[in-house]
Image (cartoon, grey):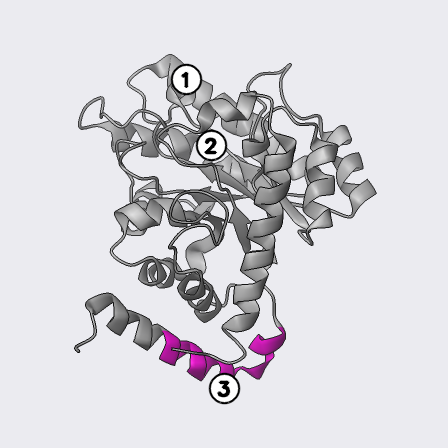
Amino acid sequence: MNAQNWEKKREKLVSDFGKLLVSKPATQEQRLKLSWSNWGFGMEPLEKSVRRLKKNDIEWIELHGNRYGDDLGYKSSDVKKVLKDHGMKAAGVCGMFGPENDLSSNSGTIRQNAIDFIRRQLDLCADIGGTYLLVVPGAVGRPVAYDTSEIDRSVETLRLVADDFVKAGIRAAVEPVRSAEVSFAHTVDDVKEYIARVDHPGVRHINGDVYHMHTEESNIAEAILEAGEMLINLHLADSNRCALGDGSMDIDAILMALYLIGYADGLRFATPEPLGPGGDPYPAMHGKPDEAALDRLVADSAKYWREREREIKNPVRE
C-alpha cells in the first residue's frame, strides 16, 4: 500500500531527526523548556498555581497578561516573591487582545487601549524577569473583518510601541490564531509577512499554537520548521484542546520538529495551554476554577510530554 502524503512527510521528519541525533549526540541529554500558560486557571491565586506546576516538574510559567488597567492585575513584588519562594521562573506574559484592545480596530480609542495595554504588560514582564510578550494582531473573538484595512492599522499601531519592546528588553511574540477566532493572521506565513511589514527590531518573533496550527496549517511539523529561529514560544494542547495525550495530535512530530530547529537552545519554551473543547474558552479566565480538574490536566500533560520526549530519542521509531 502506498503511503499517504502525511506519512511521507513524517517519514522524512523521522529521518532528519535521526540524522540530528547522530550529528549532535548532545541532543540525547537535552530537554525542552516546559512552561505553562496560567490564564486558563482563572481566579486561582498565583501561589496555588505555581505549587501545582512545580509539583509536576514545570519550572517556567507564562503569566496571564492581566494588567487591564492601573488598578487591575498582578503586582510585580507579589509575583516575584511567589516565584522566588517556589523556585519558579517567568517565561513571558500572555497578552490578551479582544475587541476592547484591538490593534486593528477602526476606533482610535480602542487602538489607544491596545497601546496602553501593551505598555502595562511590558512593565510587568520586565519587572518579573520574563522574556517575551505575546501579541495578537487582531481581536480574539472577532472573526469577521471590520474592513480591508485591518492589517494596515494593526501594523501602524504595533509599530508605535515597538521601541518600548526594545527598551524593556522583551521580545514581541506574534501569534497566528485560527480563522474561527480572528479575522486575519492565521498562519505562520501570515505572521511572518505581518512582522516584515512592522519592520522593527523589537518585533521579530513568533508565538505558535498547535491547536490553531491543527486547523490552519497543512502540516504542523512543517509549520514549525518554517517558523524556524523566529519561534520562541509554542502553546500546546491536544487535537481536542484538552490535555496532551487525550486526542490525536502527533506529539512526537511536534517534538522532533522543535529539536530540528534547535529549540532546546536559548530561551524558547513549550507551553501547554489546554483550554478544553468548544468555541469560546475565554470566560474561564475570570471564573473560579475546578482545582481537581486542573491538577489532572497539568499532571497528565507534563507526564505525557516528557514520556514522548524520551521516546523519540530512544530509539527513533517509525
Question: Which numbered marker is on residue 22?
Answer: 3
Q: Quadrant of the N terminus?
A: bottom left
Q: Residues within 10 Å of mark 1 (few under 14, many from 20)?
A: some
Task: Indicate whether 185 appears above or below 270.
Answer: above
Whichever of callouts 2 and 1 sits on the residue coming sooner in the sequence is 1
Q: Whole-Å distance between the Cαs marked 3 and 2? A: 44 Å
Is residue 15 one of those drawn in magenta? yes
Question: Label 3 vs label 1: CA separation?
Answer: 51 Å
Q: Residue at x 46, y 50 (%)?
A: 246
Task: Identify the residue at horizontal 35%, vertical 15% (top origin).
Answer: 108
* SS assignment at label 1: helix
Question: Label 1 amino acid?
Answer: Glu
Name which of mark 3 and mark 2 comes first in the sequence.
Answer: 3
Give whichever of discs 3 and 1 has the lower sequence position.
3
Is residue 88 in view from this perspective?
yes
Q: Residues in magenta?
A: 14-29
**Residue 308 in the image: above or below residue 300:** below
